[in-house]
């Protein structure tokens, strides 16, 4: 037989064998004896239990949906030169460049024509609308494609000229995640080497394919159940991704880490609370483990100077926030500016803004690097705006003051183990730091009966009211530096908070993974909230101009070569000022709190200005889910001019619910209304008031209120002070349910 015939015979034999075994398997399946009746009953019972435990099929850890073809170029392995260049066509890092200056060389939109700016496009992103979420992200743009992340950690790629959504990435965050101290937020994403880098709130770092949004790699940074979270935007440089951890209100030990951008492997990690044998460890008690839960989180994206081979960051509060009695010493490197070796992460230098902080006056504002000529010499400068109300100006090569900083004696309390002195920068503060007689009378009222004091005044069992507060001064909203005006632009808050420490208070006790602030702080009810927009000369640290608002300044700053400064306002406006003198030149009203930093880019010769306007929990602003983008050729002067079909929207429903788990917040079992009220509380009240009404950031303690049900309902409906009204956003049934839960807190210890 010839070769062809042998091949045919072999094929027939193979098919016969395969068919035989397939038939046998089918026969076995068909003739399998049914289980005994008792086994059948057990199976049915198990199925019923399984169905009662979860009526949903398990959700994927990651979902990526492609809506249209990706048309842009893929981001390269950006060089140091690429990342240091002030943004123009693209905006490729969170701060615009690796210096975090938020300054663009674009000038087609300038002081002469910014009044003609109109809305070009608006896109509804479809997530992060619940009150627990905050929209704080700065979008990135590369080759005409925009990348943004919502407070629900949903990432979307959009056409930067139209707002059309190209792909969407939805993570399934950890079930029962409840260790986010200050609301559910993300401040942005990173970009480089064809990947979009995402820090998830549950302490994971993920790399997405730039063209599809699909996961390339994922690594667990730390354990969210211990209080570790991520809110900062990752920074890409030299095939590495840099990210820090948040969680200072949970007794974590903060750190910055570098990861391999190709696979997510950790390269180095440097703790912001030094251990035995490390520089700064002697500023913590030597006989306890206070340093292991010493806080000093990292809320923001670091800055890099590749020439000096240093990476710079600022840190948050020591833990517990408001109780220094168990952590004697300066508590390095909390409330500090820290410089590390870029290659190894080793310590280079530090400057501590607040020693032994007991007021949560830390440093969450991003570090900014700049070069400036002073006394005929080009100086390598660094600026950081603190919650204290000062800008700290340093030489970034060695950490020495650029303008001048004086160490001055401050009031003492041996129970709080207070530091003897605190640093006072030479120059102007951008918010008040003392309560004058006039402020006491006009802002607090003539019948205000509690002690008022200056900055750095300690407290113990009697409430002490001071300003600025844990809201700032400068909070997280990024500042900006314009090398043409040589001005540093900063947003500040001017509010009044009272502090007290009570022995035996639940807030004093450390429990892993639970809120631990050590004392009580709360805003003074009915006192005004004010904000400032300030331009400061970096050569003198003196104010050049300042705008004062009757609300918190809680967004961030963009400045451009067009002599412009753009900021967002709590009431929904995006505002443009003359960068040289502060004159307001333009504004546009969005439909939610404009609580994220504006940014700019250019496509095909057209300059755009964009802002993610979605509201903020801690600012108490109206929530939304839209990105607004403007140009001189835009069509719409107001949002009302936009037709219904003129707003882009996501065609994909994003299931971001992760509330099946029960975390540290509890409600009495068996009461369905109270259980429902707990869920509503977690989504709307937790960030400000804390778990079980204790340890929040902007609101008073709730478990010791002496209010009637009618008073609670009225407060939830109407709001007051920092608290927004919830009538309209919550139904009558939801308001009644959350009030039932509040009553359970009030009655818990009675």
Image: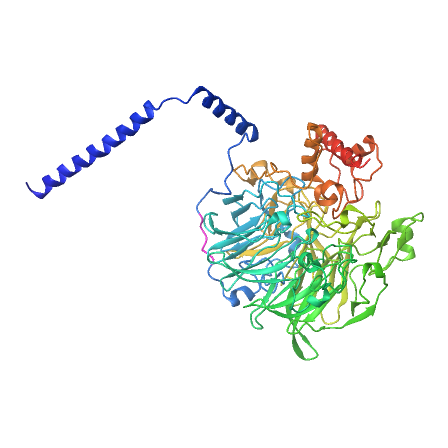
| Residue 643 percent across, percent down from the top left | 59, 37
Q: Residue furthest left?
A: 1
Majority secondary structure in the magenta region: loop
- Tell me residue 732's x, y (percent): 73, 28
Percent from the top left, x then y, of residue 183? 67, 46
From the top left corner, tell me how far across and down residue 727 is, in percent.
Answer: 74, 33
Q: Is residue 725 left or right of residue 305?
A: right
Asked if the stretch drawn in magenta spans residue 73, the answer is: yes
Which residue occupies the foreground of this view, 484 or 92? 92
Q: Nearer the viewer, residue 336 or 405?
A: 336
Q: Is residue 691 magenta?
A: no
User: Magenta span covers which residues?
Assistant: 70-75
Quadrant that contains the C terminus? top right
Snapshot quadrant of residue 268: bottom right
Residue found at x 80% / y 49% = 520
Query: Can residue 729 be seen from the camera position used here?
Result: no
Q: Quadrant of residue 725?
A: top right
Q: Judge whether residue 133 can be spotted in this image.
A: yes
Q: Residue furthest bottom?
A: 376
- Residue under the image location 84 percent in, 35 percent down: 707
Q: How many marks?
A: 0
């Amino acid at each position: 037989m010839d070769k062809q015939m042998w091949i045919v015979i072999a094929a027939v034999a193979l098919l016969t064998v395969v068919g035989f075994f397939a038939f046998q398997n089918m026969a076995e399946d068909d003739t399998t004896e049914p289980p005994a009746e008792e086994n059948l009953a057990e199976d049915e019972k198990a199925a019923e239990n399984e169905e009662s435990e979860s009526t949903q099929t398990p959700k994927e850890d990651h979902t990526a949906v492609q809506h249209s073809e990706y048309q842009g170029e893929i981001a390269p392995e950006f060089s140091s030169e690429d990342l240091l260049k002030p943004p123009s066509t693209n905006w490729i890092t969170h701060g615009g460049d690796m210096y975090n200056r938020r300054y663009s060389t674009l000038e087609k939109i300038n002081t002469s024509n910014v009044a003609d700016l109109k809305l070009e496009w608006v896109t509804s992103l479809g997530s992060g609308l619940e009150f627990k979420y905050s929209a704080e992200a700065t979008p990135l743009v590369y080759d005409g494609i925009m990348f943004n992340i919502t407070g629900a950690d949903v990432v979307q790629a959009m056409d930067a000229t139209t707002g059309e959504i190209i792909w969407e990435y939805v993570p399934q965050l950890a079930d029962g995640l409840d260790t986010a101290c200050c609301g559910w937020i993300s401040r942005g994403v990173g970009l480089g080497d064809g990947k979009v880098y995402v820090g998830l709130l549950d302490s994971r770092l993920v790399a997405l394919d730039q063209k599809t949004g699909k996961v390339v790699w994922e690594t667990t940074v730390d354990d969210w159940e211990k209080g570790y979270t991520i809110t900062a935007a990752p920074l890409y440089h030299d095939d590495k991704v840099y990210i820090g951890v948040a969680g200072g209100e949970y007794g974590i030990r903060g750190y910055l880490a570098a990861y391999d951008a190709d696979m997510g492997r950790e390269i180095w990690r440097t703790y912001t609370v030094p251990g035995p044998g490390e520089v700064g460890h002697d500023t913590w008690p030597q006989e306890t483990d206070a340093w292991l839960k010493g806080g000093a989180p990292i809320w923001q994206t670091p800055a890099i100077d590749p020439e000096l081979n240093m990476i710079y960051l600022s840190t948050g509060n020591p833990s517990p926030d408001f109780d220094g009695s168990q952590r004697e010493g300066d508590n390095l490197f909390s409330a500090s500016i820290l410089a590390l070796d870029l290659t190894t992460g080793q310590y280079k230098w530090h400057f501590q803004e607040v020693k032994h902080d007991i007021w949560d006056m830390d440093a969450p504002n991003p570090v900014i690097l700049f070069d400036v000529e002073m006394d005929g010499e080009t100086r390598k400068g660094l600026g950081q705006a603190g919650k204290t109300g000062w800008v700290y100006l340093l030489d970034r090569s060695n950490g020495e003051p650029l303008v001048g900083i004086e160490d001055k004696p401050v009031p003492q309390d041996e129970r709080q183990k207070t530091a003897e002195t605190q640093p006072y920068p030479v120059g102007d503060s951008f918010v008040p730091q003392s309560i004058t007689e006039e402020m006491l009378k006009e802002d607090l009222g003539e019948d205000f009966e509690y002690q008022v004091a200056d900055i750095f005044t300690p407290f113990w069992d009697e409430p002490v009211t001071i300003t600025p507060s844990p809201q700032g001064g400068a909070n997280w909203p990024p500042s900006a530096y314009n090398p043409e005006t040589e001005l540093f632009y900063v947003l500040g808050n001017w509010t009044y908070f009272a502090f007290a420490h009570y022995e035996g208070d639940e807030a004093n006790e450390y429990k892993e993974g639970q809120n631990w602030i050590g004392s009580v702080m709360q805003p003074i009810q009915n006192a005004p909230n004010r904000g400032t927009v300030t331009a400061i000369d970096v050569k003198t640290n003196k104010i050049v101009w300042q705008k004062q608002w009757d609300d918190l300044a809680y967004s961030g700053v963009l400045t451009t070569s067009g002599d412009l400064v753009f900021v967002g306002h709590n009431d929904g406006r995006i505002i443009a000022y003359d960068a040289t003198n502060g004159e307001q030149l333009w504004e546009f009203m969005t439909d939610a709190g404009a609580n994220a930093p504006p940014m700019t880019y250019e496509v095909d010769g057209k300059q755009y200005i964009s802002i993610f306007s979605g509201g903020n929990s801690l600012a108490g602003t109206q929530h939304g889910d839209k990105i607004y983008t403007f140009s001189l050729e835009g069509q719409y002067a107001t949002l009302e001019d936009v037709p219904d079909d003129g707003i882009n929207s996501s065609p994909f429903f994003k299931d971001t619910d992760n509330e099946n788990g029960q975390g540290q917040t509890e409600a009495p079992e068996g009461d369905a209304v109270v259980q429902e009220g707990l869920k509503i509380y977690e989504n709307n009240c937790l960030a400000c008031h804390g778990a079980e009404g204790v340890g929040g950031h902007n609101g008073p303690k709730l478990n010791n209120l002496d209010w009637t049900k009618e008073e609670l309902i009225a407060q939830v409906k109407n709001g007051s002070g920092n608290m927004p009204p919830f009538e309209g956003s919550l139904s009558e049934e939801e308001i009644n349910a959350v009030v039932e839960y509040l009553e359970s807190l009030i009655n818990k210890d009675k």
